[in-house]
Amino acid sequence: MRLIQTAEEQAAEATQAVQAAQQAAEQAGFSMENSQQYLEMAKEYGMAVAGALVILIIGFWFAGFVRGRLMKLFARSDRMDETVSSFLASLAKYAIMIVTIIAVLGQFGVEATSLVAIVGAAGLAIGLALQGTLSNVAAGVMLLIFRPFKVGQFVDVAGHAGVVKGVTLFVTEMDTGDNKRIIIPNSAVWGSSIVNVSFHDTRRVDLVFGIGYADDIDKAMDVIKKTIAADDRSFSDPEPVIAVTSLGESSVDILVRVWCKSGDYWGLNWSLLKSTKEAFDKEGISIPYPCRSIYMEKGE
């Protein structure tokens, strides 16, 4: 009887051991399945992230490459204005960057149609938030259409004067006379008065010389006329204008207007000032300066 009980107990323990082994096997299989799933998910998303990075790097590099190639291609054409070519090249660059971003989002399962819907729904909010940026784009388009200036021309705009170096999608780049780069938003350029100094091939130099009341006016005017004629940069047609413009407090003011090439404007201006002063000194013509006489009365 004792042997039978012992055998039954051993059989029960064996059964429990088998059941424990089965449970352990089931748990091990479950954890292995979970590990396999995690590995597959990590592999899937890892490949998506790697693919997105590759697309982003290649896309941004390609955008810069296309812009550079377009600039070189447009530079070979005599019909393509440099201002237009700079704007179009910049537009192509940003278009490629946008397509690249859409492709990157596609790597994470965002469909293009869904993205368009999201952009359309958020368009109003984005437009209100980016009013300044969008106005710069619109102003850049207006500058491209009406072209009040070209690359390489000297302009005075938005309180700054310099040579235009480029018009991009958002800003206008200029270099000042002392070689400083100025970046001006397109909206500020389009919304202000634009003075294009280089628009015409010729410019007029306006000067005023004051002589003393005791000096010979005709002689002074003849000296100025000879000084102008001696400078090859001055035009004889249109004929220079030399006339008495006003009778000042201490001088007779003679107005001088001379035409020249736009590139000779400052050189002729400075040269005439120096040459006329030297000619006046040689001919004994005075250039008076304001003076005051003070009379003092002695009190009683």
Image (cartoon, helix red, strand yellow):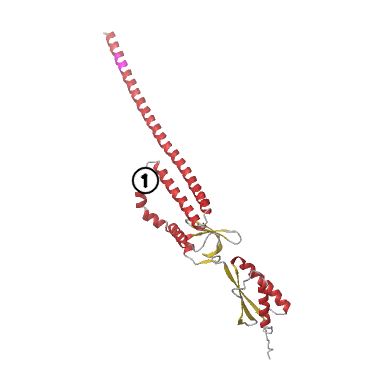
Kind of residue at disc 1: Ala
Instruction: Tell which of 208 and 5 is nearer to you.
Output: 208
Report which quarter residue 44 is drawn in: top left
Relative to 112, residue 82 above or below = below
Q: Position of residue 195 (x, y in %)?
A: 52, 67
Q: Report the side of 26 relative to 159 (left or right).
A: left
**What SS does tag 1 mark?**
helix
Q: Report the side of 126 relative to 168 (left or right).
A: left
Instruction: Tell which of 289 and 58 is nearer to you.
Output: 58
Q: Does the stretch in magenta take in 132?
A: no
Q: Report the side of 121 relative to 94 (left or right).
A: left
Residue 95 appears in view: yes
Q: Report the side of 245 relative to 188 (left or right).
A: right
- The majority secondary structure of the magenta stretch comes to helix
Q: Which residues are magenta?
A: 11-15
Residue 212 appears in view: no
Instruction: Look at mark 1 in the image and give the residue it sits on.
Output: 112
Relative to 45, residue 28 above or below = above
Q: If the image is split into quadrants, where does the N terminus sit?
A: top left
Report which quarter residue 250 is drawn in: bottom right
